[in-house]
Amino acid sequence: MDFGLVLQTDPPASAVVGLMRRAERNGFRYGWTFDSAVLWQEPFVIYSRILEHTTGLIVGSMVTNPSTRTWEVTASTFATLNEMYGNRTVCGIGRGDSAMRVAGRKPNTLATLGEAIGVIRDLAEGREADVDGRPVRLSWVEDGKLPVWMAAYGPKALALAGQQADGFILQLADPYLTASMVAAVRTAASDAGRDPDAVKICVAAPAYVGDDLAHAREQCRWFGGMVGNHVADLVARYGEHSAQVPDALTSYIEQREGYDYSHHGRAGNPDAAFVPDEIVDRFCLLGPADAHIEKLRELRALGVDQFAVYAMHDAREAVIDAYGERIIPALG
């Protein structure tokens, strides 16, 4: 199992670079960041520094979207980083939550997302692609490689990930939900004539190592609020208690009243107060190192290739070190 570190690009950027370097020293193979230009600093600028100051870390977005930048700009940016540092990037992409909504725009449709996945990958790898009705090719790209991994929760998005993406990003660590969603992605891949085992599976969630479970929950409760934004979209589309979306994912948002993106992804987010302890425990990895190892072994048995640690809490360095000392050696 591979391990990744997920950060927001809060200033100073040097701190993000430093944490990524620390992660690589501790055995992490991937470094991810949010991509929301209004809320945080521009990640692609910071990726260049991370890549320069690490030796093998693979860097990517968790997640970008098809509208913040035009597709040829996204492809060119990744391809430039790959030319400079040797194909060490991955494009995580989704419909767009905070990046779009905080700027007053709606998330992209799945149709747009599906088209963007193919175009961005083709352009970044040097192939010609259709952009707004005309053929475009980045003629300077040589031997480029850009895996595109898609974030998804709902049935149509899971199918799209299986049909078109190189990897599937699931932003929660509940084994029951992971099993059903991984199965949906792999079935869609197989039905599309693809090798289902070739689709990488990445589970991303907060991890907090320690014995004070109450404190860990309060540091990670924000995650249930963030996931709740996507869940609310699914409930609006499919209705409550839908056969297409499990209650295990949707029932907890009944008390959700709203969401202010100024607190997005941050410990102490007041808009996550509705999230019960049971959801924090299911969606995150909490407790002593042995508890993390046990849950990660369960996820690995379900086909998870990578666990990416969301480190938006008061123990970032301690969690990175604990994973390097105890957890990654047990599962890497």
Image: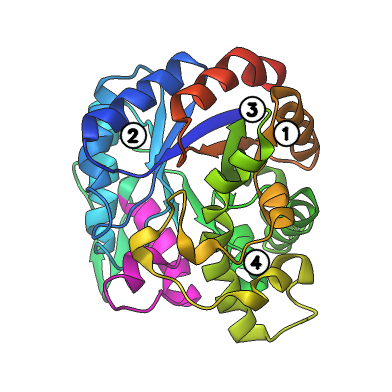
x and y, in percent, of residue 272 in the image: 53, 62
Q: CA distance from mark 1 to mark 2?
A: 35 Å
x and y, in percent, of residue 46 in the image: 24, 37
Q: Is the residue 127 above or below the residue 48 in the image?
A: below
Q: Quadrant of residue 145?
A: top left
Q: Which residue is mark 3?
A: 210
- Based on the picture, tell me whether residue 116 belongs to the magenta stretch: yes
How many other residues sit within 10 Å of disc 2, few (<14), some (14-19) or many (≥20)? few
Q: Nearer the viewer, mark 2 or mark 4?
A: 4
**Amino acid type shown at disc 3:** Gly
Q: Which residues are magenta?
A: 94-123
Element marked by disc 4: helix
Left or right? Give the position of 250 relative to 91.
right
Q: Which residue is mark 2?
A: 143
Q: Is the residue 37 above or below the residue 285 in the image?
A: below
Q: Which residue is mark 1?
A: 296
Which residue corresponds to the image point at 73% horizontal and 52% vertical from the top-left? 178
**Amino acid type shown at disc 1:** Leu
Q: CA distance from mark 4 to mark 1?
A: 25 Å
Quadrant of the frame with the N terminus = top right
